[in-house]
Every structure is written in structure tokens, then in C-alpha cells.
Image (spheres, helix red, strand yellow):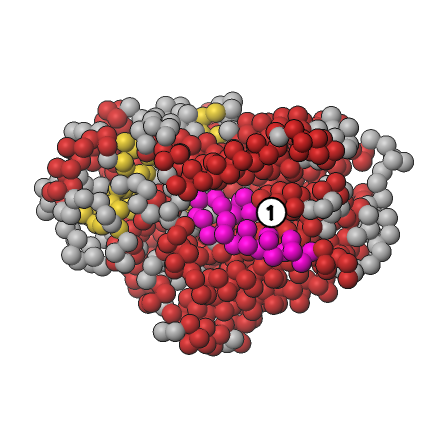
């Protein structure tokens, strides 16, 4: 069947009035849970699984997929408005997005996120439609050594996330790596840093750490001094992008989309790197790297496009090979099975209407999301006029409910309080939270792939340089370090990194 | 006289309590029932639970809600049910891990035989031996020879400490009296990804995870670990046919906390048996490559017996392998 006929079939399924309705419900719910910190797509999809029993397979899967990519749109909203990322991908958006909000440019930041996401979502969907099977094949060449090399590269270039002291940034990455170690060692079963508490065997919950370190710490800081309290947004200047803004975001959106699409296809955790990598790239390429961390619109445009592109392309391994790239995709596998369809390489041939219907619905969903989100910008920005004393306790409460609902684990709620205090202390010492989260997210992946590569090679470390992809990635990592160390460039770097000291 | 009064009063009180108890059991259930699945949503055990819960809801006239309490290899969720009120409103649906936990975890805060009242077996999911598609051996006999000859040069993937694929690997190495290099993954999905990608040699995993890949020719299949062949993979021989002494099924059971009223257990048992005879459940289970157990197996006695014998079996295997989870 050629691609036009296939897409025609897909749109005939996706444009069925009931399926349009499910798609809309999905993206609407996704936007809402994305906006509410703590309640992520994982919890939402898990809660909605029983309801999907009574729907048609296409309707059920269209709705669940909508929740997932819809949450990527919504997740940036709280990151920008109140410095509270609900997902690892929006932690990067918070860096410059929140600064923009503080300068009264919340509107343009949100609009950039929505437009960038829409562009990225469209490209991701097209990739899925045209090249899914060969792309999934190519991604299978990534084994443990390649993932290890990729994450090393990601960590090294992401030093750029810091805009203060480089020493503090490194310290934060190391602290993040250590926090990532909490839990049961997947190779030996040995509990690490669990203090005999079984609830910690699965490690710390990302959302708890992020809400604590970003959100609760911010509240504590604001409690310091009644008069010094930040009035959240001075005056909202305008809601829409200027001509100059459009010029500035165009290239970052395209670059972020490319980076995100490529990383999203890798089932071993590539999507996590997407927004971090895009931010680093934009900072390197920018003519004004000093603006990053102080409200650079490129720092919102790139990562937001990257994470949405990755969200879309992470469906590729699932749809074409039946292998889930991350927990949300694992839930989608469950949803397929509950509908009596086992996801695998044969779905595309056995269930063409379902396969192409879902793909077509993704594009329709992205259109709905941009139509839904752009008018909502005004509403979200108004949310900032809610008195601080009402808004923040409400948000922390939502976050606690959300964290608890994922695993019914009370320690996930305790962690919010604990990391709130930690985050406050770090803030007083002038340490940035973003590198900590990067270490926390990537540390466990780094260890997992390093050890797996070494086990499979039976202790032979040359595996990292004898495999071409891994060797190339490590070569790029070395190059990144060399460039950073070269004296002439170092001088320039000093200007970049020390401006706050 | 006084003593008699007290005795009478006590007797009346006890009778009243007993009456209250049975009246309570007769009304059961009067509110939604929670079935704790000690793994995250979307996995094979969760899927089994949701399919069964859906039908049990209709039979019991109350919603049966699946709640996922993942973590610590299923021991967190099981531990929660062990200490839950034994009023029949909190149940546990657990798999083979119920019988391995007492050995895998040297400091387990509950006792699977003493802290739970079994309700019945649900299904036993077959496991399949599969390898990357360019792996040298083509038949089960060749595979056995290959593993014996190459030992630790063969890489065996499993889905994590205490997972069914790890257990099957232990049995396989035990049966062949050799060691392979075992490589843990975080779940069956990533392990299967590396098998399909040819990064790792082989895995023994639940047919739920392997059937579609076998049918599509993405992996090479050698055998199924049940006494009979699978209906949806009729060409795949059993391990027994191939001369390999390896039999394992990922059996699932439904439990209540110990001390739950016998009348409640009976009601749940009946509802479970009805669910396992339901057309939708049977056809969805078939998609998973499994069949519901017969009604005589969906009973407290059958589950209790399976649990006890499996605890003994795995104690030997796990201690021999020297693998622990804490």
C-alpha cells in the first residue's frame, strides 16, 4: 500500500467524529495534567485504562496518545509561569522561560512553546508516517556502549546549562548523580542509600525532587522577607511574539526539532536528552550566550521543540517494533493488549486502519493543541494575578496529590518536603538546580549502560572505541572538552560563565 | 449466679458478634473492592488483573478497582495488603514472585503463607526460549549443546532481579549445569529491544512479551516451557519434547489478608471462577498466549498448595544460584 493511500485510510479513521472527540478529550486532558505539576501522563493514562475497555481500539489509543503528547504542551506552562517543571524535559524550559515570565514576557514564552511544539509535532508525525520502519531499524544499532557514549556526550556539553560558577555546576551534577543512585542496584539487587526503607527501593521520584527543589525552595525563599517578596510578574507587556521574536526562534525551533526527532527514536532513553541537548546547542550557537539564563527566548524555543519532537518520534519503536521507549509507552503496550491487539512488527500490516489512524490523529491532535493553547495563554498569564499566598499552597497540594497517586508511596510526598529544604539551602549558596536534575536523570542511565556494556563485553573496555557509533560519539565528547580547554576559547568562556560571580 | 450472668452475657455477646460477622459477610460487598497489583500499570500482571477485575465487578455488583503499588520487586504492594484490614475490600493479585520473595529477600516483612488467605489461581503464563535472529543454534537440541559448549560466552538477558525471566534463566542454567553471562535490564521491554537489535544472545520470557516478535520473525524461538504446545504458536515445540528438563509457568493468584471471613473468600472464589469462564477473558488471555485455569484450580486449596510447593522449589534454586535482592 503506498503512503498516500495509507494516510488516506488513516485520516478516514482519525476524522471519524467519535475519534475526533476522543482525540480532543485526550489532548485536553493531556494539557490539563501537564499544567498541574505532579500529575503526569503516566498517572493519568494508568487511571484511564479501565475506561478505555468500552471504547473502540482506535478511539482508546488515539485518546491515550493524545494525553501523552498533550502533556508535553501543558508541561511547559508551569515551568514558565512559576518555575515548576512537571517533567524532566520541562526542567530546561524553566531556566529561561521563568526569567522571561519575571520580565513580563510570559505571553511570548508560552506562545513560543506552543508554536515550537506544533512545528516539532508536525515534523515528528511526518517522520513517523514516512520513515518509521527504517528509522526503528537504525535505532536498534544502539546498544549499551552507544547509549553510554551518547550520555557522556550529553553530560559534557550540558555543562552549558549552568550560567554561574562552573565549579558549582559540576558539584550540582555530582550531587544529582548521587541522588540518582538511591534505590536497588538493578544488577546485584543491593539496596543503596535506602536506610532500610523499602519504599526507597525504586529510587526517588523525579517529580518529587523537581517540585521540592524548584517549587518549595522558591516558596521558602519568598517567606524570608515579606517586603522582598517577588511580585511574580511585573506587568505583562504583550501576549504575542514580536517580529524580532519570530526571527530569533525560527532557527532554534528547527534545530530543536531535528535533535529531538533523532533522540526520540532511540528506545534506550534518548528522549530524556533531547531538551538538555537542544539548550546546550542553542547556547553554543547563539551570538548572545550571555542572555541564556536571563530570559533568552531561544532557550525556550529550542528545548520545547526538541521535547515535543521526541515525544512524537518515541512512538516509532512502539508502533513498528512493539518495544516501549519509556514508562508511558509501556502503558500504551498495556492499552493495546487490553484491546486485544499485541503491539509488534505486524501491527502495521494486520491493523493498517489502526496504525495509520493513530498517526493521522496525532497531526490532528497537534492542530487542536495549538488552537487550544494559544487562546489559553491569556488565561494562564492571568493565573499569575492570583495572590501568591493562595496560588502556591494550592500548587504544592496538587503536586503532593499527583506524586502520591503514581505509586501510592508516601515517601514520594516526604521527598517533596525534604528536597524543598535542600533546594532552599542550595539556592542560598548560589547553586543552580538544573544541573542537579540533569545528573539525577542521566546518572542512573549512565551507570546502567556502562555496566551493561562491560558485562556484555565480559570486562573489555575497548568495546567503547571499537564500535563505530560509540567511538564517534566519544570522539565528539573529547572534541567538546578540547574546545572548552583551548586557551583562547577559555578566555571567552570566562566571560560567559563568570558574569554572575 | 454472677458468674452465670457473665457467662451468659459473654455468650450472647459472642453470638451477637458472630451473627454480626456473618450478616456482614452476607451483605458483602457493599463498597468498591481494591485489588492491589504490586507492579506498575501496563505490564502483563496488570493486564491480567484488569481483565479479571472487569468481569468480577459485574458478578459482585461492586466495582473492583485495580491499584498499582509497584516497587521492590512486588514486595511493597504485597506487604501493604498483608497489613490491610481483612474485611475483603483489599485484595492482592500477585504472580510467581509471591513464592520467590521469601528466599530472594532475606528481610521480608511478611510471610506469604501466614499473612494471606488464598482465593484461587488465575492463569499460568507460559514462557518461551528466544534468541536474536542470527544466533547460531536453530533447534532446541542445538541450543543446549551451544550453551554447554560456550558457557559464559553466551549472554542471557533478564528483566531484573526477581523477574520471571531471571527465574527461568536460573532453571535453565541449573538444567544444563552451566553458567551463562546474565545481563539484567529494567523490565522486559528494554531486554527485548536488545534481543531484536542483536546486542545480546537470548532470553526466556513470558509468551506475552515474545509471541508477536516470534510471529514476525524478529527473534528465533526454541521452545515453550509448558507441558503442552501453545495454541497460537503450534509449531513451537515444548522443552520436554526437545529433551530439556525445564518447566515453568508464571502463575498468578488472588489473595486476601489472613483472617478474612470464610464466607467472603467463598464469594470471591465464585466470582473469580465466573470471571475465568468469561468469553472476553478467555479470548484476551489467548492474545496473551495463555489460558485461564480450570474451576478446580481457582480455589483456595489449589492456590495454597501451589504456593507452598513453589516456595520450596525456588528456595533450592535461588540458594544454589546465590542471587539475592537485598
Q: Is residue B242 left or right of residue A225?
A: left
Q: Quadrant of the C terminus of chain A?
A: top right
Give the quadrant of residue A163. Answer: top right
User: In this rendering, would A156 be left or right of B258?
Assistant: right
Q: Is residue A440 left or right of residue B303?
A: right
Q: Position of residue A235 (x, y in %)?
A: 87, 52
From the image, give the main secondary structure of the stretch colored magenta: helix
In the current view of this chain or complex, which residue is farthest to the front? A488
**Secondary structure found at label 1:** helix
| Residue A34 x/y as whole percent | 62, 53
Horizontal arrangement in the rendering, residue B263 relative to residue B321 (left or right): right
- Residue displayed at 18% across by 35% down: B147
**Is residue A418 at all visible to an observer of this figure?**
no
Residue under label 1: A278
Magenta stretch, residue numbers = A249-274
A271 part of magenta stretch: yes
Label 1 crowd (10 A; few <14 / some 14-19 / many >=20): many
Amino acid at each position: 500500500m503506498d503512503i498516500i493511500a495509507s494516510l488516506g485510510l488513516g485520516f478516514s479513521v482519525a476524522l471519524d467524529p467519535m475519534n475526533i472527540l476522543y482525540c480532543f478529550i485526550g489532548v485536553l486532558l493531556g494539557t490539563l495534567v501537564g499544567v498541574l505539576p505532579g500529575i503526569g501522563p503516566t498517572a493519568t493514562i494508568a487511571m484511564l485504562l479501565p475506561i478505555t475497555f468500552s471504547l473502540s481500539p482506535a478511539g482508546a489509543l488515539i485518546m491515550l496518545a493524545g494525553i501523552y503528547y498533550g502533556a508535553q504542551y501543558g508541561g511547559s506552562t508551569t515551568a514558565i509561569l512559576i518555575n515548576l517543571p512537571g517533567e524532566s524535559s520541562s526542567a530546561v524550559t524553566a531556566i529561561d522561560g521563568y526569567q522571561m515570565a519575571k520580565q513580563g514576557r510570559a505571553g511570548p514564552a508560552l506562545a513560543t512553546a506552543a508554536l515550537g511544539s506544533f512545528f516539532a509535532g508536525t515534523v515528528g508525525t511526518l517522520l513517523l508516517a514516512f520513515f518509521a520502519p527504517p528509522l526503528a531499524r537504525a535505532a536498534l544499532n544502539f546498544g549499551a556502549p552507544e547509549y553510554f557514549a551518547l550520555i557522556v556526550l550529553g553530560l559534557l556539553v550540558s555543562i552549558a546549562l549552568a550560567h554561574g560558577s562552573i565549579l558549582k555546576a559540576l558539584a550540582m551534577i555530582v550531587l544529582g548523580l548521587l541522588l540518582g543512585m538511591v534505590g536497588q542496584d538493578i544488577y546485584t539487587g543491593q539496596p543503596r542509600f535506602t536506610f532500610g526503607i523499602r519504599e526507597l527501593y525504586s529510587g526517588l521520584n523525579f517529580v518529587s525532587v523537581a517540585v521540592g527543589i524548584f517549587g518549595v525552595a522558591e516558596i521558602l525563599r519568598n517567606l524570608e522577607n515579606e517586603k522582598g517578596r517577588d511580585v511574580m510578574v511585573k506587568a505583562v507587556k504583550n501576549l504575542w511574539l514580536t517580529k524580532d521574536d519570530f526571527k530569533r526562534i525560527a532557527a532554534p525551533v528547527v534545530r530543536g526539532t531535528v535533535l529531538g526527532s533523532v533522540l526520540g527514536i532511540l528506545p534506550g532513553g534518548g528522549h530524556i536528552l533531547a531538551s538538555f541537548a537542544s539548550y546546550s546547542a542553542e547556547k553554543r550557537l547563539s551570538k548572545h550566550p550571555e542572555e541564556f539564563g536571563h530570559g533568552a527566548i531561544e532557550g525556550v524555543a529550542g528545548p520545547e521543540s526538541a521535547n515535543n519532537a521526541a515525544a512524537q518520534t518515541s512512538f516509532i519503536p512502539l508502533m513498528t517494533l512493539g518495544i516501549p521507549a519509556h514508562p508511558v509507552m509501556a502503558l500504551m503496550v498495556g492499552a493495546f493488549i487490553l484491546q486485544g491487539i499485541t503491539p509488534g512488527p505486524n501491527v502495521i500490516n494486520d491493523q493498517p486502519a489502526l496504525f495509520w489512524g493513530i498517526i493521522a490523529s496525532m497531526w490532528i491532535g497537534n492542530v487542536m493543541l495549538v488552537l487550544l493553547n494559544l487562546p489559553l495563554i491569556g488565561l494562564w498569564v492571568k493565573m499569575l494575578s492570583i495572590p501568591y499566598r493562595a496560588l502556591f499552597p494550592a500548587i504544592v497540594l496538587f503536586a503532593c496529590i499527583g506524586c502520591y497517586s503514581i505509586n501510592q508511596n508516601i515517601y514520594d510526598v516526604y521527598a517533596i518536603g525534604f528536597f524543598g529544604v535542600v533546594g532552599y539551602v542550595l539556592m542560598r549558596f548560589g547553586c543552580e538546580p538544573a544541573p542537579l536534575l540533569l545528573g539525577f536523570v542521566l546518572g542512573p542511565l549512565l551507570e546502567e549502560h556502562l555496566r551493561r556494556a562491560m558485562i556484555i563485553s565480559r570486562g573489555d573496555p575497548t568495546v567503547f572505541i571499537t564500535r563505530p557509533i560509540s567511538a564517534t560519539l566519544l570522539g565528539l565528547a573529547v572534541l567538546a572538552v578540547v574546545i572548552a580547554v583551548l586557551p583562547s576559547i577559555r578566555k571567552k568562556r570566562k566571560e560567559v560563565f563568570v558574569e554572575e560571580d | 449466679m454472677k458468674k452465670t450472668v457473665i457467662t451468659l452475657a459473654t455468650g450472647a455477646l459472642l453470638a451477637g458478634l458472630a451473627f454480626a460477622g456473618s450478616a456482614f459477610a452476607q451483605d458483602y460487598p457493599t463498597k468498591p473492592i481494591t485489588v492491589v497489583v504490586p507492579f506498575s500499570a501496563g505490564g502483563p500482571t496488570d493486564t491480567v488483573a484488569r481483565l479479571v477485575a472487569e468481569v468480577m465487578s459485574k458478578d459482585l455488583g461492586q466495582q473492583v478497582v485495580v491499584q498499582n503499588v509497584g516497587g521492590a520487586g512486588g514486595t511493597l504492594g504485597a506487604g501493604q495488603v498483608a497489613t490491610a484490614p481483612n474485611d475483603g475490600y483489599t485484595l492482592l493479585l500477585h504472580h510467581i514472585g509471591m513464592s520467590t520473595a521469601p528466599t530472594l529477600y532475606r528481610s521480608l516483612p511478611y510471610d506469604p503463607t501466614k499473612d494471606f488467605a488464598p482465593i484461587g489461581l488465575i492463569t499460568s503464563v507460559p514462557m518461551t526460549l528466544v534468541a536474536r535472529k542470527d544466533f547460531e543454534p536453530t533447534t532446541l537440541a542445538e541450543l543446549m549443546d551451544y550453551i554447554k559448549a560456550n558457557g559464559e560466552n553466551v549472554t542471557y538477558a533478564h528483566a531484573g532481579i526477581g523477574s520471571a525471566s531471571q527465574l527461568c534463566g536460573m532453571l535453565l542454567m541449573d538444567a544444563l549445569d552451566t553458567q551463562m553471562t546474565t545481563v539484567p535490564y529494567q523490565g522486559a521491554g528494554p531486554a527485548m529491544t536488545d534481543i531484536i537489535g542483536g546486542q545480546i544472545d537470548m532470553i526466556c520470557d513470558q509468551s506475552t512479551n515474545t509471541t508477536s516478535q516470534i510471529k514476525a520473525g524478529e527473534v528465533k524461538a526454541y521452545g515453550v516451557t509448558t507441558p503442552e504446545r501453545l495454541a497460537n504458536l503450534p509449531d513451537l515445540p515444548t522443552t520436554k519434547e526437545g529433551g530439556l528438563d525445564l518447566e515453568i509457568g508464571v502463575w498468578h493468584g488472588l489473595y486476601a489478608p489472613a483472617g478474612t471471613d470464610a464466607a467472603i473468600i467463598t464469594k470471591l472464589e465464585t466470582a473469580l471462577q465466573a470471571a475465568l469462564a468469561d468469553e472476553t477473558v478467555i479470548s484476551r488471555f489467548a492474545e496473551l498466549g495463555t489460558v485461564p485455569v480450570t474451576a478446580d484450580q481457582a480455589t483456595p486449596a489449589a492456590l495454597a498448595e501451589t504456593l507452598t510447593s513453589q516456595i520450596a522449589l525456588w528456595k533450592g534454586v535461588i540458594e544454589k544460584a546465590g542471587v539475592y535482592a537485598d
